Image: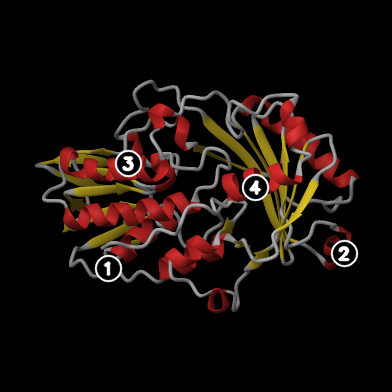
Amino acid sequence: MDYYDLIIVGAGPAGSTLAGALANSGKRILIIDKQDFPRDKTCAGWVTPAVMDTLKIDPQEYGTGRTLQPIRRFRIGMMGQPPVENDHGDVVSYGIRRCEFDDYLLRRVSCPKQLATPVKAIVRKDGNWVINDTWEAPLVIGAGGHFCPVARLLGEGPGGHETVVAAKEVEFEMTPEQASACQARGDTPELWFCRDLKGYAWVFRKGNYLNIGLGREDNHKLTDHLHAFVEEMKSAGRIPADLPGRFKGHAYLLYAHAERPLVDDGILLIGDSAGLAYTQSGEGIRPAVESALMAADVIHHAPDYSASSLQVYGDAIAERFGNRAADLEEGWQVPDWVKKPLASTLMRSHWFTRKVVTEKWFLHREVPPLKAAV
């Protein structure tokens, strides 16, 4: 049996950020992930300058040999009506490919890693956790996304009725002919809100790569909405007529509607396993990174790994992202006060789409970057 101080299940941005933040803590850390890296990851894939700053990533260095698409504009609309374009002037975000970004973050971490290793068993034994009858630690971290096996140890949450967002998307490298036919611009991601306000679709060009997808809170209508959107974008010339491959699905929880506990004795959840995706945008990379840094600070200073000691982390999450219990509005992307037909009018407003949709909901420009405290 190999013993560690903590085991991180999940090697994505949350897991690698946590391991990196604890690199000089003297703790023995193991990262386990069911996939080898680099690996395909279904994600629209953009990160704000705040994330790059928090992770201490030099855009020029990262962009050498990797996809890094500067974003200066957004094209936003409600399906079935003309969109609005807003020019932010400066770079307000970057398009990345998760297969490259996640691998880059993981390679910066020097702790032991067990990749291509599914977690088949997590057993409590003498106050520790034993994984796959091979690795043992008093603390196990869930960083494996929505279906993380560590999160399953904590159940479905108080009510078990969490709103799960389902999404389907495809990302591919365009041929010269496809790139010529595609009217979508790399510096201008397109966001298209569903008319019933239960989701949105996107078209996002990153150099020669194109990402198209749609996410909704009602999975049974997802395929129909996606098909209609894709056909509309083809007809408008926004995307090539010949899309390769199948759209891949994934799921996640929105912060305001998640009921999943964050801590228990010897357990702590970060990133999508904790249900931290921003409620209005569904974006999860920044919450994943910030939750990992907050977890690292708590782990570094906690007297033990009891639920009461780790609850400091839960309090820090509530302070940073808001109190879930106080946010009981219905619906997913759009707050309760944005109702039809008002939403249709608002989505034609340059002020609303820029100041509220883009800068507040998607970019969180009013929130300063979180610095590592360990």
Report the disc number at residue 180. Answer: 2
**Residue at image coords 36%, 47%:** 270
Which label sits in the foreground, 2 or 4?
4
Residue 203: percent from the left, percent from the top? 73, 50
The residue carrying pointer 1 sits among few (fewer than 14), some (14 to 19) or many (20 or more) residues within 10 Å by Cα, namely some
Instruction: Indicate the quadrant containing the N terminus: top left, top right, bottom left or bottom right.
Output: bottom left
Nearer the observer, 361 or 97: 361
Q: Earlier in the sequence, mark 4 or mark 3?
A: 3
Q: Which residue is mark 4?
A: 355
Q: Quadrant of residue 5?
A: bottom left
Badge 3 amino acid: Val
Q: Earlier in the sequence, mark 2 or mark 1?
A: 1
Look at the numbered discs 3 and 1 and tell me whether their residues touch, using CB distance below 8 Å.
no
347 left or right of 39? right
Answer yes or no: is residue 198 visible.
yes
SS label for mark 4: helix
Q: Earlier in the sequence, mark 4 or mark 1?
A: 1
Q: CA distance from mark 3 to mark 1?
A: 22 Å
